[in-house]
Image (tube, rainbow, N blue to C red):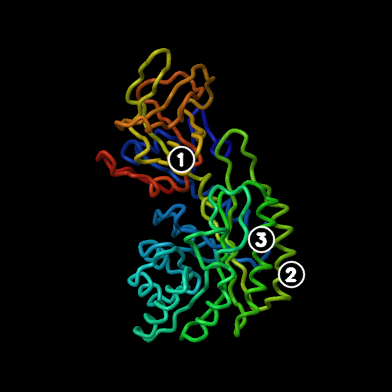
């Protein structure tokens, strides 16, 4: 991939040649994330966004502690979706007021921890609002609260639709006026709304439309509150290219539209801080997954490269993490970047299941046992989204380089 340079045919990550990186890791398989690429992506995004817009990192995209700590120092806040992620966020030393906690089905233990930490809880239901208030009374703390809204629209062409229709996420927009009345009757510090309609979108016009509708909805709903709206998490949805034919998201029209929107927001909701929450867009292209060819075999005219990695480490690359029709992530032989692609192969893992496919019918230089297979676009929803204990293979390593 163009974001990773190579020297003498050898891929470099953070300036380190792949074989040396493998030695550092103690062998394969492993994930490696390039901190320079992460920093460049964040800097480019901050240059494009209006200064008024706060940039938050959604930890669920990649919860490796070193990655979270690195990003926390370069963004305005963090978004978590579990007690484990909350503890990671607090360990960075970031101000609790810059951490938000989302996700349906928060337990009382999680709500208690969030209240004790002083983070903003994105309430997903009327019942969660009541439980949060009771926990605040118990602890003698006034919880910070944002209401997650299930909007009456969707982010068109998104990889995963998180809003619109019947959803487990948030409170339906038409129920928000009643929810706000409930909040006002309880001892809660209401900050605003979290309106997240979808993810992994490569169509800037769809993102622009969703952002406009988000602002319009927030303004309409804020009219039902007795106190000013101070916080508006508009979600994200920015996608990255994974497959042939994917077109990279054009930030320029999104940026121009956000400058217009922040002007409207300043007039209509003057105390509100707008937040863009992104995960894979910040880290997805910075990471690679590396495994090693342990066997080369032919079966009825097809060549199979059997590796020591697979879906237990990288479920998304296997096509079993939300793909309807399986497509290959971009792959390469990391020490033969300057060689011609001379054969068509299938790259598979060691698991006893036909689902353990890393890449099907891809053109590569002729591979040998010991070659290092690289799967690009692996910085988000990699290891933490995979069943790494399946069939009890050894644990995998991760590095921030």
In space, the residues marked 3 and 1 are separated at their CA atoms by 31 Å
According to the picture, the residue beneath numbered tag 3 turns out to be: 211
In space, the residues marked 2 and 1 are separated at their CA atoms by 39 Å
Name which of mark 3 and mark 1 comes first in the sequence. 3
Residue at the (45%, 76%) spot, across then down: 129
Residue at the (40%, 38%) spot, across then down: 21
Q: Provide residue 365's location: percent of width, then percent of height.
A: 49, 20
Residue farthest along the top direction in this orientation: 301
According to the picture, the residue beneath numbered tag 2 turns out to be: 263
Is the residue marked by circle 2 packed among few (<14), some (14-19), or many (20+) residues within 10 Å?
some
Q: Quadrant of the N terminus?
A: top right
Q: Provide residue 49's location: percent of width, then percent of height.
A: 66, 60
According to the picture, the residue beneath numbered tag 1 turns out to be: 288
Q: Provide residue 18's location: percent of width, then percent of height.
A: 43, 35
Please state which of residues 80 and 162 is positioned toward the viewer in this rendering: 162
At mark 2, the secondary structure is helix
- Left or right of 291 on screen, residue 324: right
At mark 1, the secondary structure is strand
Rendered image: mark on residue 235: none
At mark 3, the secondary structure is helix
Q: In the displayed structure, would residue 59 be above or below residue 24?
A: below
Comparing marks 3 and 1, which lies closer to the viewer? 3
Comparing marks 2 and 3, which lies closer to the viewer? 3
Name which of mark 2 and mark 3 comes first in the sequence. 3
Residue at the (40%, 40%) spot, across then down: 314
Mark 2 vs 1: CB contact within 8 A = no
């Amino acid at each position: 991939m163009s974001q990773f340079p190579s020297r003498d045919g050898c891929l470099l990550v953070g300036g380190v040649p792949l074989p040396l990186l493998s030695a550092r890791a103690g062998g394969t398989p492993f994930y490696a994330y390039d901190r320079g690429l992460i920093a460049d992506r964040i800097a480019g995004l901050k240059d494009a966004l209006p200064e008024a817009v706060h940039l938050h990192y959604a930890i669920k995209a990649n919860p490796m502690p070193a990655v979270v700590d690195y990003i926390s120092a370069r963004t305005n806040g963090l978004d978590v979706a579990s007690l484990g992620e909350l503890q990671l966020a607090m360990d960075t030393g970031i101000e609790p007021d810059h951490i938000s906690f989302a996700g349906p089905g928060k337990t009382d233990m999680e709500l208690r921890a969030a209240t004790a930490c002083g983070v903003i809880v994105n309430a997903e239901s009327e019942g969660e609002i009541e439980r949060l208030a009771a926990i605040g009374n118990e602890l003698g703390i006034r919880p910070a609260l944002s209401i997650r809204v299930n909007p009456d629209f969707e982010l068109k062409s998104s990889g995963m639709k998180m809003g619109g229709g019947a959803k487990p996420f948030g409170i339906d927009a038409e129920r928000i006026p009643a929810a706000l009345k409930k909040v006002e009757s309880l001892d809660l510090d209401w900050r605003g709304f979290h309106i997240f309609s979808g993810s992994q979108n490569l169509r800037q016009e769809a993102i622009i439309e969703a952002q406009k509708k988000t602002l319009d909805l927030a303004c309409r709903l804020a009219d039902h509150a007795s106190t000013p709206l101070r916080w508006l998490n508009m979600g994200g949805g920015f996608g990255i290219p994974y497959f042939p034919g994917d077109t990279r998201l054009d930030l320029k029209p999104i940026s121009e539209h956000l400058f217009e929107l922040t002007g409207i927001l300043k007039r209509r909701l003057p105390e509100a801080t707008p937040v863009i929450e992104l995960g894979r867009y910040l880290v997805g292209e910075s990471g690679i997954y590396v495994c090693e060819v342990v066997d080369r075999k032919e079966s009825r005219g097809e060549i199979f490269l059997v590796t020591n990695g697979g879906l237990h480490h990288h479920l998304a690359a296997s096509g079993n993490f939300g793909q309807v029709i399986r497509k290959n992530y971009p792959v390469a032989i990391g020490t033969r970047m300057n060689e011609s692609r001379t054969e068509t192969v299938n790259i598979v893992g060691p698991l006893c299941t036909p689902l353990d496919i890393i890449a099907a019918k891809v053109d590569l230089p002729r591979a040998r046992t010991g070659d290092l297979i690289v799967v690009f676009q692996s910085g988000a929803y990699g290891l933490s989204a995979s069943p790494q204990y399946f069939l009890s293979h050894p644990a995998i390593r991760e590095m921030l380089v």
